[in-house]
Image (spheres, rainbow, N blue to C red):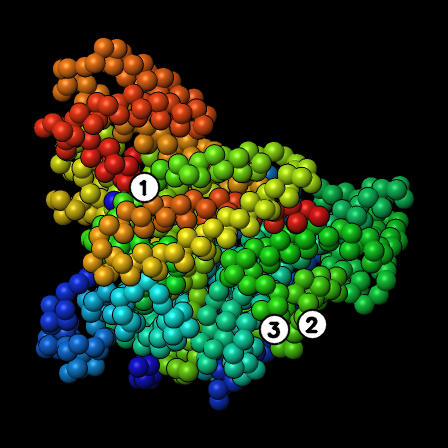
């Protein structure tokens, strides 16, 4: 199982003492005694970092606002004349923050992350979904032909639109499944995994279609 | 949070634009960035004259270029961080002889001596530094140096090294278009989306940023490190040669003096054509002066393919940022080549906005670098730049597939971790091979280096858990580590690009991903299916060893299905592979059902667990 990160679920009491003054840091990202920057990945999961409830549905504008506020606290640019340890923590905290943002702003990554938080693991199957296999191969064949006829070009454009639409529909449908899963219905997990795999293949193939059509535009 | 500039013994921190054609410095005074002029103006041409042990840099070197053509070096930025073999194909288009140093790095050969692009760039930086010190009347010891957004790790590292050699502490290397946006956006815009179109002498970059309350968030970046005004000049030179030939003149192209003269005239014609419909140049061949006229129409026809290439990259950057032209609030032009009216028209047409260049296309980058230097030394904390990495970074997994850990346009600093496992029974080491690029197969991407994690306890294939971590800092320097989660054994390296393994250059790689994207889908499907197929075959074979009772003909059917699947694995047709895999699953379905009810039930689950694993070779 590929794990993209190791979610920390310990509470702040599990955090070691301040690296600088060796006292209890308190719960924030800065030591309450000496105000030095502290490792932020020990403070809980990504939802905690942004002070959000654990849920699939997220207000993206709010997320971005909180991201900017936290960037202003941690960014390495503000620590470039600090001690080595401060510089390292600024880098690690910002990297963690950036990763948290990209995870929570993307429906697929958010779903995978939420699954790993809820059930500890998920099956990230690299196997092409049976439902889409023929369709993907057809698109692959279209993309392979050196010059597209007008008809083929239209088919490709339609396939691209259809892929995008189904991706969005599948992603939207995850919200309901997640509220079931978070509500204690473990049965929803399998369905979420299967839909996620479909979304990933739709996305990957869709990106190929776009690249091909864009390339064609460029030649005209 | 910003630390006080407590260190009073430190000198002034400046911003430097180290350009292919021109370089210059700027500093922030009373909160405003200003370019620092020397006796010849703010610009220091990136031209070096090496004659009789004497070194001249900037305007004097450029002025003496034609008579000293054999001793003059320019456009040295094109060699930064490159292998000599990268220039095998276009050595003739370079204004000097490219040599290889002992490590295979591209260098310049003059008078039988080899100079590295790093030391030559250091000489330019030193000149810029001295000019700044003279103007400021103070010691300058720290700088932010700008690089094309599309520079890879090696090119960035080379730039930092040049800074060090010039006696500067390099506070940061920042991307040129981002720097320009800082200079523009710091007081002109509260919020909005801006596009920076940066076409310089040797490189092209496009960056899209979102500004919000002092935060400059780069949304996407695209570019080409081998596209710029130098190419325009080359096109004009070739046109001049064609026309000269028709007049019966045969300029000696082997003579470096003639080449320098042609280039100077081409550059002059290019500038003239910005204002007029035609330009006339004179070239002396065999003591006859030939007059050659170039029309603006001819010039624009020559430019079209180059400019179209930049348009394609602009579209990709918008696509990556998930934006359309309606979302764009401002378009900023940077780099001397945006003075060409044809370029401006095309940019305006694409974005449907009149582009801005009020800071002067030459000065904006250095001014932005000065603003960043001010931020980094604690001068101001209301502005913050959030930049991205231009190319995806990943490792090779089974089948030669690129498994990206950090994607292009990810915000930096960045980190990523992924868990991998082994593919061979009892495997005791794994090779972690690191690549940069957008293609599906590592063979088509640029190798950044590799290392082995050894001492893994022999275990069945698929059992070890090896965690690979990437940390990319704000300068774009990558650190990779691999951890055997069972033994706690760890290996880590700071990635230094290895040369000569893959001479493809970054921009070529991305261009390739446009062209070749089509042939990868089937390959990838096939590779992914083969992993499943191999797992199923493995599980079936183990099941056959364990089970002794079969229905009539069952075992034979299964064995046949295994054989056919193995044949399909040897081929390359993914549809056939899928069919044969389904056949085998059908043939074993009954067996599987019986096993679930028996003690062997656990066994079958392996099938699906193994599907989920990735393999490091």
Q: CB of mark 2 within 8 Å of CB of mark 1?
A: no
Q: Which residue is mark 3?
A: B330
**CA distance for labels 2 and 1:** 49 Å
Please state if B260 lies on the left or on the right of A85 as rendered.
right
In the rendered image, which quarter contains the N terminus of chain B?
bottom left
- B596 left or right of B472? left
- State the residue at coordinates (64%, 42%): A153
Please tell me which residue is depicted at 39% across the width and 82% down the height of the picture: B381
Quarter of the rendering containing residue A145: top right
Quadrant housing residue B430:
top left
Chain containing mark 3 = B
- Residue B354's disc is 2
Instruction: State the residue at coordinates (76%, 51%).
Output: B302
Chain to which the residue tagged by mark 2 belongs: B
Up the image or down, B352 lies above or below A4; here it is below
CB within 8 Å, label 3 to label 1: no
Residue A96 at x, y percent in the picture: 29, 64
Q: Residues within 10 Å of mark 3 (few under 14, many from 20)?
A: some
Q: Looking at the image, which is closer to me, B331 or B32?
A: B331
Q: Secondary structure at mark 3?
A: strand
Residue behind mark 1: A125
Q: Can residue A91 be seen?
A: no
First in residue order: circle 2 vs circle 3: 3
| Above or below B357: residue A102 | above
Q: Position of residue A176 (x, y in %)?
A: 33, 59
Badge 2, how many Cα within 10 Å: few under 14, some, many 20+?
Answer: some
Q: Quadrant of the C terminus of chain B?
A: top left
Q: Where residue B198 appears, x then y in whole percent? A: 60, 64
Q: CA distance from mark 3 to mark 1?
A: 43 Å
């Amino acid at each position: 199982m590929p794990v993209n990160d190791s979610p920390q679920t310990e509470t702040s009491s599990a955090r070691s003492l301040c690296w600088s003054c060796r006292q209890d840091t308190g719960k924030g990202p800065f030591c309450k005694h000496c105000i030095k920057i502290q490792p932020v990945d020990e403070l809980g999961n990504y939802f905690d970092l942004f002070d959000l409830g654990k849920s699939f549905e997220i207000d993206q504008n709010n997320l971005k606002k909180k991201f900017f506020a936290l960037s202003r606290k941690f960014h390495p640019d503000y620590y470039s004349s600090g001690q080595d340890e401060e510089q390292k923590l600024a880098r690690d905290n910002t990297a963690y923050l950036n990763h948290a943002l990209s995870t929570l702003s993307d429906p697929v990554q958010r779903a995978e992350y939420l699954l790993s938080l809820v059930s500890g693991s998920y099956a990230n199957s690299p196997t092409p979904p049976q439902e889409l296999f023929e369709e993907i191969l057809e698109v692959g064949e279209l993309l392979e032909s050196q010059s597209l006829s007008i008809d083929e070009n239209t088919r490709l454009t339609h396939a691209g639109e259809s892929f995008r639409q189904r991706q969005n529909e599948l992603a939207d449908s995850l919200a309901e499944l997640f509220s079931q899963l978070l509500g204690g219905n473990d049965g929803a997990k399998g369905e979420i995994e299967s839909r996620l795999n479909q979304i990933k293949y739709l996305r990957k193939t869709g990106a190929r279609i776009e690249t091909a059509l864009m390339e064609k535009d460029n030649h005209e | 949070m910003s630390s006080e500039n407590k260190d009073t013994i430190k000198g002034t921190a400046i911003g430097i634009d180290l350009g292919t054609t021109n370089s210059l410095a700027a500093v922030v005074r009373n909160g405003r960035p200003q370019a620092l002029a020397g006796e010849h103006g703010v610009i220091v041409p990136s031209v070096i004259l090496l004659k009789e042990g004497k070194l001249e840099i900037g305007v004097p070197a450029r002025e003496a270029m034609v008579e000293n053509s054999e001793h003059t070096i320019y456009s040295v930025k094109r060699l930064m961080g490159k292998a000599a073999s990268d220039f095998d194909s276009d050595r003739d288009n370079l204004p000097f002889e490219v040599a290889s140093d002992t490590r295979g790095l591209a260098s310049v050969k003059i008078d039988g001596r080899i100079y590295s692009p790093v030391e030559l760039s250091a000489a330019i930086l030193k000149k810029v530094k001295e000019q700044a010190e003279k103007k400021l009347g103070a010691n300058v010891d720290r700088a932010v140096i700008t690089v094309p957004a599309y520079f890879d790790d090696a090119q960035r590292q080379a730039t930092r090294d040049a800074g060090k050699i010039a006696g500067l502490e390099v506070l940061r290397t920042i991307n040129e278009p981002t720097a320009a946006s800082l200079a523009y956006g710091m007081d002109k815009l509260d919020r909005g989306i801006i596009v920076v179109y940066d076409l310089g002498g040797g490189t092209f970059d496009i960056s899209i940023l979102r500004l919000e309350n002092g935060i400059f968030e780069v949304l996407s970046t695209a570019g080409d490190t081998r596209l710029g005004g130098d190419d325009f000049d080359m096109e004009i030179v070739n046109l001049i040669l064609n026309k000269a030939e028709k007049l019966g003149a045969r300029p000696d192209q082997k003579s470096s003096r003639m080449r320098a003269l042609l280039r100077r005239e081409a550059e002059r014609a290019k500038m003239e054509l910005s204002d007029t419909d035609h330009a006339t140049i004179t070239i002396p061949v065999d003591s006859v002066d030939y007059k050659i006229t170039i029309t603006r129409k001819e010039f624009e026809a020559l430019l079209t393919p180059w400019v179209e290439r930049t348009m394609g990259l602009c579209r990709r950057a918008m696509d990556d940022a998930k934006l359309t032209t309606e979302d764009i609030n401002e378009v900023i032009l940077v780099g001397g080549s945006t003075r060409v009216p044809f370029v401006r028209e095309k940019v305006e047409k694409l974005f449907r906005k009149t582009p801005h260049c009020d800071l002067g296309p030459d000065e904006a980058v250095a001014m932005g670098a000065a603003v960043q230097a001010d931020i980094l030394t604690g001068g101001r904390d209301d502005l913050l730049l959030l930049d991205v990495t231009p190319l995806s970074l990943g490792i090779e997994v089974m089948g030669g597939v690129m498994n990206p850990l950090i994607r292009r346009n990810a915000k930096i600093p960045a980190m990523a971790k992924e868990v991998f496992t082994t593919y061979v029974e009892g495997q005791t080491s794994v090779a972690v091979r690191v690549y940069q690029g957008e293609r599906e197969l590592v063979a088509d991407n640029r190798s950044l280096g590799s290392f082995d994690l050894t001492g893994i306890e022999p275990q069945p294939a698929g059992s070890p858990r090896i965690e690979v971590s990437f940390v990319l800092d704000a300068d774009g320097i990558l650190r990779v580590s691999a951890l055997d989660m069972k033994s706690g054994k760890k290996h880590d390296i700071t990635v230094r690009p290895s040369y000569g393994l893959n001479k493809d250059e970054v921009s070529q790689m991305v261009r390739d991903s446009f062209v070749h994207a089509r042939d990868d889908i089937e390959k990838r499907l096939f590779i992914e299916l083969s992993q499943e197929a191999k797992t199923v075959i493995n599980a079936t074979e183990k099941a056959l060893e364990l089970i002794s009772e079969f229905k009539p003909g069952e075992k034979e059917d299964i064995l046949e299905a295994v054989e056919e699947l193995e044949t399909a694995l040897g081929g390359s047709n993914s549809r056939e592979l899928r069919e044969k895999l389904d056949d085998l699953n059908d043939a074993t379905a009954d067996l599987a059902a019986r096993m679930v009810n028996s003690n062997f039930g656990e066994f079958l689950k392996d099938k699906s667990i193994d599907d989920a694993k990735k393999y490091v070779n």
